[in-house]
Amino acid sequence: MKSNLITLAFMIFSFTMLQAQSLNDSKTSFSIIGGVNFQNLTGTDFDGKKLENNLITGFHVGAQAEIPIAPEFYFQPGLLFSTKGGERVDGPITTTTKLSYIELPLSFKYKGALGNGHVVLGLGPYIGYAIGGNVTDTENESNTQDIEFVNEVSASDPIATPYMKALDVGANFFTGYVLQNGLFLQLNAQLGLVEINPDDKRIPENDYSIKNTGFGISLGYWF
């Protein structure tokens, strides 16, 4: 399942770039992008109380295409590797959750001339699929457990094993500035729209809910 979805993401991105080249090669651009993430896991605990988690630092790296659809407006698909997660402090114990995703952002972008470059504003959905993750606590730093990605946890599953859903879907927002030579700086924000915690049959009728939320800073270069 995991390999099939990752392959599908690569196929969609590759097909989009090939179509863009065939439709309007002189105006379609491509970029490499990388930067830092500041991510959190937001939502509610089993009792319905708001989670008081802290941000953790991660990173993202990947490629994008810029496909013209109207004067100053573009469709911008991308393919990224991105790390996310959050940190929970409970008395002397700090528990850190780290997640790694392959993401497919599908954004619509405005790019208008400003000075010697262009200002950009964009938004759109993103689809992410987790390819790894772990949970570590400071009570016993050697106690690092790999996350198991499932959609449902049965009543007989181990209570100590961390579980998450692999699929993440949300909204992506960004703004930035592109220099005349193609270098750009970008501020990003993401809002997870689906729960990434599985349906847990071990604890019936609970209000547990976790979503990815965060922002970041990117640097890149348009070819």
Image: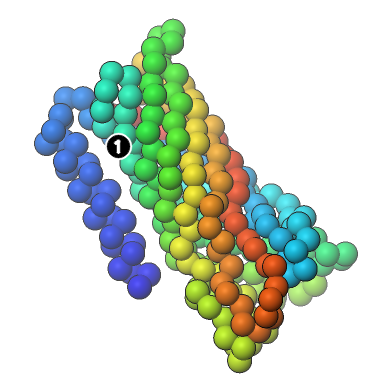
Coordinates of residue 15 in the picture (x, y in percent): 20, 48
Under circle 1, the secondary element is strand
Q: Is residue 173 above or below residue 11?
A: above
Answer with the quarter of the image where residue 19 lies: top left
Q: Quadrant of residue 140?
A: bottom right
- Residue 152 appears anywhere in the view: yes
Total numbered circles = 1
Residue farthest toward the right in the current orientation of the protein: 91
Structural crowding at the residue carrying mark 1, measured as other residues with C-alpha within 10 Å and reported as few (<14), some (14–19) or many (≥20): many
The residue most toward the top is: 115
User: Is residue 78 shown above or below 7?
Assistant: above
Residue matched to label 1: 65
Work out which quarter of the rendered image holds the C terminus and state it.
top left
Q: Is residue 140 above or below residue 218?
A: below
Q: Nearer the viewer, residue 17 or 222?
A: 17
Residue 206 or 52: which is nearer the viewer? 206
Left or right, 120 with reference to 78 = right
Residue under the image location 49 percent in, 50 percent down: 170
- Looking at this rendering, what residue extends furthest in the bottom direction? 156
Residue 61: tell me if it is visible.
no
